[in-house]
Image (cartoon, rainbow, N blue to C red):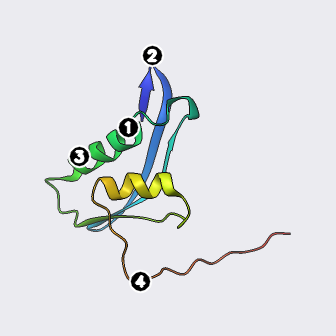
Amino acid sequence: MATIAENPIAYQMTTRFFDHLHLARIAVHPQYRGKSIAKALLNNLSAHFESSNIESISVNTQIDNHSSLGLYTSIGFSQEDSLLPVYCFDLT
C-alpha cells in the first residue's frame, strides 16, 4: 500500500500459488495517477520476491486498457500466447 500522511492512496493485491504470483488488483486514487505510484508498487512487489523461489507474476487486463498495458509492458510484462477462459454467473 502507498500512503501520504498515513492516508492510503494506492494498493495492490497479489495471490501466491506455489512458485507463481498473480496480481489480482492494483489501484491508485485518481488524484495521484500518472505519478508512477503503481509502477513503484509493482517494483516493490518484484523486489520483495526477488530472492525467493517465485518464477513469474501474471496479471489479466482488458486489451483496451492502455494505461495498464503501458504500465505492465514498461516493467517487462509480456503477453502470453494462451488465453485464459473467463466464466461468469449471471445473478439477474
| Residue 85 horizontal/vertical position (percent) | 54, 81
**Could you tell which of marks 4 and 3 lies nearer the N-terminus?**
3
Q: Is residue 59 left or right of residue 40?
A: right
**Could you give the CA–CA distance between mark 2 and mark 1, rounded to whole angstroms?**
18 Å
Give residue 5's mark: 2
Rendered view: 22 above or below 68: below
The quarter in which the N terminus is drawn is: top left
**Could you tell which of marks 1 and 3 lies nearer the N-terminus?**
1
Which residue is depicted at the point 49% across and 36% down?
33
Give residue 82's mark: 4
**Could you give the CA–CA distance between mark 1 and mark 3, rounded to whole angstroms?**
18 Å
Q: Which secondary structure, mark 1? A: loop
Which residue is depicted at the point 29% across and 53% down?
75
Q: Which secondary structure, mark 2? A: loop
| Residue type for callout 2 | Ala
Q: Are marks 3 and 2 in contact (CB under 8 Å)?
A: no
| Residue type for callout 4 | Ser
Which residue is depicted at the point 41% across and 42% down?
38
**Could you give the CA–CA distance between mark 4 and mark 1, rounded to whole angstroms?**
29 Å
1 vs 3, front mark: 1
